[in-house]
Image (cartoon, grey):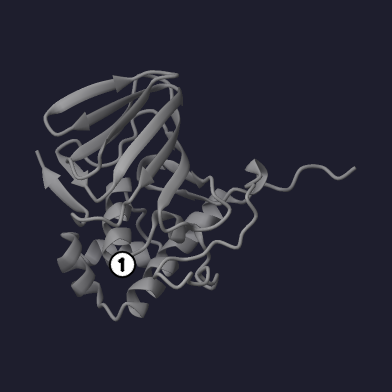
């Protein structure tokens, strides 16, 4: 009997992220400076991310994906991997298998070692559904910054303790706790204590306004 399928190499997947972002930016007819202006990020940072010389934070990736009209799940794809065909209403029609085996999940690693693994077998325009790991001390963005974007978020913590700031309020999400909130509220996530945080996260209707932006607190 055959053993389990080999796990996708996370670092290889992460290295492909920059070229994927560059390809999508060019396809949108946008320059690096144009994308920087729309997202509030520096042209230097975007250029370094595209060349694989800098790893984006969670907040930076949200900003870029939103401005390019992508679901975060799109960024797990290889540059040459085609999008699903349109269903005729501007949304992609998924032709993928309904099951995503855990051995072959696509993954990317972000700034601070934050890891996202896509839980759907293909990109989906209506939901971002991911398995997330926040290493000890990791956060979605710098302490003095918050991010907001369209949609609504739902999270379930499997292990570790997650800090969540929404506007001026802070919450502690423990194992087996869950949280949901309007993603248009400025927010930040971070690992608390001496144990990594493992959670299942979902964002629906992310393409709704407002566009993703970073805020200083």
Where residue 22 appears, as percent x and y from the top left, is 37, 71
Judge the density around disc 1: few (<14), some (14-19), many (≥20) Cα neighbours within 10 Å: some
Write the residue at 39% across / 20% down.
177
Q: Quadrant of the C terminus?
A: top left
Secondary structure found at label 1: loop
Where residue 126 appears, as percent x and y from the top left, is 40, 54
| Camera-nearest residue between 126 and 156 | 126
Viewed as shown, does residue 25 lie left or right of 102?
A: left
Viewed as shown, does residue 79 lie left or right of 46?
A: right
Where residue 208 appears, as percent x and y from the top left, is 25, 55
| Camera-nearest residue between 46 and 146 | 146
Give the answer, above or below, for where 113 lies relative to 14: above
To which quarter of the image does residue 176 belong? top left
Give the answer, above or below, for where 129 lies relative to 70: above
In the picture of the structure, the residue carrying the numbered disc 1 is 68
Name the residue furthest bottom: 29
Write the residue at 37% across / 61% down.
53
| Camera-nearest residue between 181 and 19 | 181
Viewed as shown, does residue 16 lie left or right of 168?
A: right
Name the residue furthest left: 217
Give the answer, above or below, for where 107 lies relative to 189: below
Write the residue at 22% across / 40% down.
142
To which quarter of the image does residue 137 belong? top left
Give the answer, above or below, for where 35 lies relative to 215: below
| Camera-nearest residue between 182 and 174 | 182
């Amino acid at each position: 009997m055959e053993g389990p399928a080999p796990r996708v190499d996370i670092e290889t997947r992460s290295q492909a992220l920059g070229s994927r972002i560059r390809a999508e930016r060019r396809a949108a007819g946008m320059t690096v400076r144009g994308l920087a202006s729309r997202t509030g990020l520096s042209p230097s940072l975007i250029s370094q991310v595209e060349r694989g010389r800098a790893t984006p934070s969670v907040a930076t990736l949200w900003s870029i994906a939103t401005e390019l009209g992508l679901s975060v799940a799109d960024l797990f794809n290889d540059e040459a991997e085609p999008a699903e065909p349109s269903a005729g209403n501007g949304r992609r029609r998924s032709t993928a298998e309904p099951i995503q085996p855990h051995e072959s999940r696509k993954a990317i690693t972000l700034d601070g070692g934050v890891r996202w693994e896509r839980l759907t077998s293909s990109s989906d325009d209506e939901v971002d559904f991911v398995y997330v790991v926040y290493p000890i001390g990791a956060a979605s963005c710098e302490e003095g910054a918050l991010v907001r974007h369209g949609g609504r978020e739902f999270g379930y913590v499997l292990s570790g303790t997650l800090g969540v700031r929404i506007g001026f309020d802070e919450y502690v999400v423990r194992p087996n706790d869950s949280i949901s909130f309007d993603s248009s509220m400025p927010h930040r996530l971070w690992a608390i204590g001496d144990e990594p945080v493992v959670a299942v996260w979902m964002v629906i209707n992310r393409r709704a306004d407002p566009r993703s932006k970073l805020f200083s607190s």
